[in-house]
Amino acid sequence: QVQLVESGGGSVQAGGSLRLSCVKSGVTAISSYCMGWFRQAPGKEREQVASINSEGTTNYADSVKGRFTVSRDNAKKTVYLQMNSLKPEDTAMYYCALSGKWWCNGLRELDFSGWGQGTQVTVSS
């Protein structure tokens, strides 16, 4: 069973930055897999905001392009989400998840697993 633990959330003012981390427990490495960051705001559906495949190729939702950066440290089994120029509309619970595929393009939320408890990000205006 995949277990991922997110951390790094908090409360910031608009324009601020946060760096989220997602650590995978257990002996299985993450290096061969697509990793995704998702978020869910109150009353809204969960949406994917960023992903990174096993080769390091990244994809972003239009709403976060140019502001968020996803990266991975396979040796630490950790994926990061650097969030800059935060906006109130970025307020949400943020989750990371792992896909059993090395590529990310075309993957749906159902293709991901290992959902953790998430980490709350609150951006005030």
Image (cartoon, grey):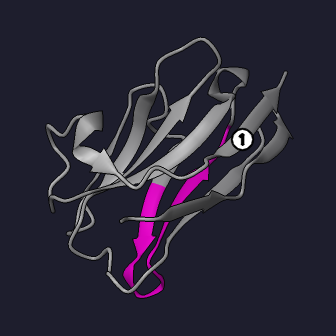
Look at the image and give the residue range highlighted in magenta: 70-85
Q: Is residue 5 magenta?
A: no
**35, above or below 47, in the image:** below
Left or right: 119, with 125 as reference point: left
**90, above or below 77, in the image:** above
Q: Residue 39: image x %, image y %?
A: 53, 34
Q: Residue 79: image x %, image y %?
A: 47, 66
Magenta: main secondary structure equals strand
Looking at the rendered image, the quarter that the C terminus falls into is: top right
Mark yes or no: residue 98 visible. yes
Mark 1 surroundings: few (<14), some (14-19) or many (≥20) residues within 10 A: many
Left or right: 71, with 122 as reference point: left
Q: Residue at x 36, y 65 (%)?
A: 1
Q: Residue at x 49, y 33 (%)?
A: 64
Q: Which residue is mark 1?
A: 120
Q: Residue at x 47, y 18 (%)?
A: 45
**42, above or below 101, in the image:** above
